[in-house]
Amino acid sequence: GQQLNQSPQSMFIQEGEDVSMNCTSSSIFNTWLWYKQEPGEGPVLLIALYKAGELTSNGRLTAQFGITRKDSFLNISASIPSDVGIYFCAGLYAGKSTFGDGTTLTVKP
Amino acid sequence: GAVVSQHPSRVICKSGTSVKIECRSLDFQATTMFWYRQFPKQSLMLMATSNEGSKATYEQGVEKDKFLINHASLTLSTLTVTSAHPEDSSFYICSARKETYEQYFGPGTRLTVT
């Protein structure tokens, strides 16, 4: 089946720094989704990408759908303490979703 | 928006009893819903895909007789953990899929079996 490699697995950064994480696969996807999960909560959809090459922003978050359709990245600019959580990518193809293992972000004030 | 609710948010039950968790899509219809299990500091583990009006599709290693799934309507899916044991204690999360294929997650249910 399809698999996603999400990296890094965890990040420890200082408040104000920029963050970058990505997901790669050997398979192509038609849609990429990025979620954030806070402790004790379900994941919340942050950004959805529908076309190869698409670059979409949501506040301080920016995500891109890789041109090869096999990867996507998420950037967070000027991180703040409330950005902490687990970020998941998900690739969709033929109605099936494949999730990455998540990137755990810790932001030090 | 797309809102998915789960009930209860927390439940404690005794070993051997059954527990039902409800998942509802509040502002859209979902022909497909998913049930996940998540252990502390780990990723989402897909348990089963719930399709309205038909039997659920279970992932390999998930006991269908233990985790009963019913997708009774386009807005409601239920997961019943039968004869619960302490090892079933976990965080259970449902999601509902829109026609555009985005999945929206519920807030999760923390199950503790004593």
Image (cartoon, rainbow, N blue to C red):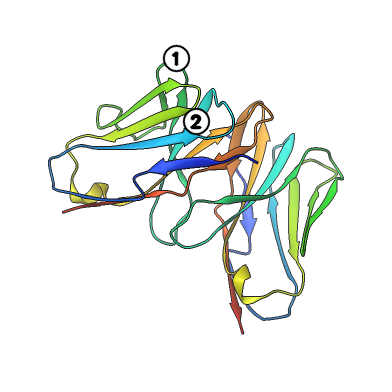
Subunit that carries the residue with mark 1 = B
Give, as a three-letter code, the residue at label 2.
Answer: Met
Q: In which quarter of the image is residue A21?
A: bottom right
Q: In this view, which residue lies farthest toward the front?
A: B27
Horizontal side of A90 relative to B54 (left or right) equals: right
Residue at x 66%, y 35% (from the top left corner): A92
Residue at x 59%, y 49% (from the top left corner): A100
SS of the residue under disc 1: loop
**Label 1: few (<14), some or many (≥20) within 10 Å?**
few
**Label 2: few (<14), some or many (≥20) within 10 Å?**
many
User: Could you say where residue B73 lies in the image, as x and y percent from the top left?
Assistant: 45, 20
The answer for how far apart the CA atoms under marks 1 and 2 are is 12 Å
Question: Considering only vertical position in the picture, is A39 above or below B18?
Answer: below
User: Could you say where residue B79 lies in the image, as x and y percent from the top left?
Assistant: 34, 33
Question: Considering only vertical position in the picture, is B37 above or below A62?
Answer: above
Q: In this view, which residue lies farthest toward the bottom?
A: A109
The residue labelled by disc 1 is B53
Per the rendering, the mark at residue B33 is: 2
SS of the residue under disc 2: strand
